[in-house]
Image: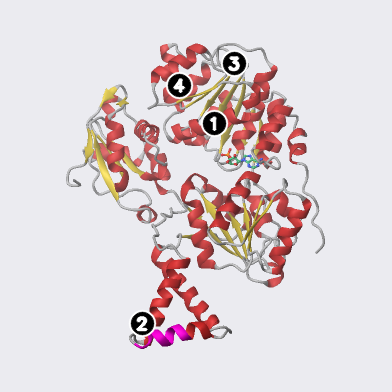
Amino acid sequence: MTAEPPPPDAAAGFAALGLRPELIRAVTELGYEEPTSIQREAIPILLSGRDLLGLAATGTGKTAAFALPLLQGLRDAPSSPLPAALVLVPTRELAIQVAEAVHRYGRDLGVSVLPIYGGSSMGQQLRALRRGVDVVVATPGRALDHLGRGTLRLDEVRLAVLDEADEMLDMGFAEDLDALLSATPPQRQMALFSATFPRRLRDIADRALRDPVRIEVGREQAAPGEMPRIRQLVFVVRRHDKRAALCRVLDMEAPQTALVFCRTRLDVEDLTEALGSRGYAAEALHGGLTQSHRDRAMQRLRAGTADVIVATDVAARGIDIQHLTHVVNYDAPAAPEQYTHRIGRTGRAGREGTAITFLEPRERRLAHRIEQLTGQPIESAQVPSAAALRARRLDVLREQVRGAASAEGLEPFRAICDSLSEDLPPLDIAAAALKALHAASWNDDLEEIPSYALTPPPRAARRDESRAPHGRASRGAREGGGTDAGAGRGGDRADARDGEWTRLFIGLGRRARLRAGDLLGAILNETNLSRDVVGRIEIAFNVSFVEVRADVAEQVIAALRSTNLRGHRVNVRLDRGQR
Ligand code: AMP
């Protein structure tokens, strides 16, 4: 191979979409090398003023797909103290994340953003709203609260966005969404993003969108024969465990050559450095590096002095690496087709290849879409346990010793063994030497890294329950006096892998108009927990029960005790018999 072709100019791809220079600068400084497919499609539509229905899940880059045109629209229009853009999201976590993204992208435009969600100080939100903000990113419950008090006015909203709309419906926010949207001017522009498009969402979309352009990420099917036969593994881990999980998986898999994909230039730099400091021979490859740097990295990989290349999609596109044994999606691909492009780099010419994908719990749905696209199963794998890793390291040690024994240069060490053997048995000398070598090369202080199931089962259960009064749980609760003891949580078997569960008693029920969505929303908004820790919710007439993962039960109890549910302070405790 000769010199690699230079990757395309990162700014040009965004400029072609019609974005302002300030926004292009912001995304290129964040290390984005090209627009994702949803961005390529959605940005020109939103800039043209049309309504949009986008079927896209988390991880596709959908936040920038609406945030960049939103910011451009604000810049191009006269300013007012009332919000000009409203983004509604299902959880507090997402409200913060989206508000931060809007802030980052709009840094040079002087746009003010306020996240509004239950659990954060009302006073602070009131002060900010009084001062005037351009963009409000809110969970529906808290936004409605402010609307009712007259502290949030939506009369001047020019763009409304529903993000993860299906999630908001699952959480029982349908009426709140209707109320909020009807407080915005009828001529406002609107974008609705959702990973799925159930019937109930269709009704809302019909009411709220005017002649929308519909776009969908990743519906194409791979051509038959296009997909190489590759072992495909997915690890579902929390974001902050990803780096440690990658190292463990690399240790276990011992790839001869691996290509690890990150989303941005900055992520490539960070991860390469982190792998280097953990003893991997890793090289970075992204569009911001000089041609000679990229050539050098490739030469090292071919010569076997590097075993891992960490790259962005753009930089990896022009390169040809033979004998790639592993492709690792450290950051999930932004679309299923990108997945097939990435993993098609291993398993070439009849060789065996392995594709490893790390997904954060929020991104799990991508796995199913990839399965649909490729028509091949993806195996859900557990991050190697500390015990498995230790055993593997001992294997490596054994091989190291075997190799060293057959190599030259043992004389000085034999002399040491000779002198030690005067008072120690030979086996003890060898074991002690191995122990010292092992301690010098590995930190044995390993904590377990939790892996999550690929299917988040409580979601389906919640969908049933939030459909009250027809849902299975509410019916069971009514008929069985509220305890519904015989009915297990939906998807028990898959859940069991995620840990032990416990049941909480809540001293409020249907009589106070409590809905499953209120409880779920309160738990997620008042804690930083993910949806996976909440199981079956039962709403009876006077009381309710929620299953939660045992390890977070105390946190959930404390959070629910310190908040209002339907305007009530509520008695929350472990259900009797579980204490
Ligand atoms: P989202 O689907 O909006 O949650 O975005 C997922 C991740 O992709 C976020 O960490 C974004 O910063 C990142 N991202 C969004 N657009 C791009 C892009 N064009 N290139 C690289 N990373 C991106």
Q: Position of residue 430 (x, y in %)?
A: 41, 81
Badge 2: few (under 14), some or many (20 or more) residues near its Cα, within 10 Å? few
Can you tell which of label 1 and label 4 is closer to the viewer? Answer: 1
> What segment carries the magenta color?
415-422
Badge 4: few (under 14), some or many (20 or more) residues near its Cα, within 10 Å? many
Can you tell which of label 3 and label 4 is closer to the viewer? Answer: 4
Q: Earlier in the sequence, mark 1 or mark 4?
A: 1
The residues tagged by marks 3 and 1 sit, at their Cα atoms, a distance apart of: 28 Å
- If the picture is divided into quarters, which one holds ligand 1? top right
The residues tagged by marks 4 and 2 sit, at their Cα atoms, a distance apart of: 70 Å
Residue under label 4: 143
Closer to the camera, 356 or 433? 433
Rendered position, 307 above or below 425: above
Quadrant that contains the N terminus = bottom right
Quick one: SS at disc 2? helix
Q: Amino acid at mark 2?
A: Asp
The residues tagged by marks 1 and 4 sit, at their Cα atoms, a distance apart of: 18 Å
Can you tell which of label 3 and label 2 is closer to the viewer? Answer: 2
Per the rendering, the mark at residue 349 is none
Res 169 visible = no
Q: Earlier in the sequence, mark 4 or mark 2?
A: 4
Per the rendering, the mark at residue 100 is 1
Can you tell which of label 2 and label 1 is closer to the viewer? Answer: 2
Q: Which SS type dominates the magenta stretch?
A: helix
Residue under label 2: 428
Per the rendering, the mark at residue 186 is 3
In this rendering, position of residue 104 left or right of residue 148:
right
Q: Earlier in the sequence, mark 2 or mark 1?
A: 1
Where residue 222 sits, quadrant-wise, is: bottom right
User: Which residue is painted at 21% across and 38% down in the image?
Assistant: 481
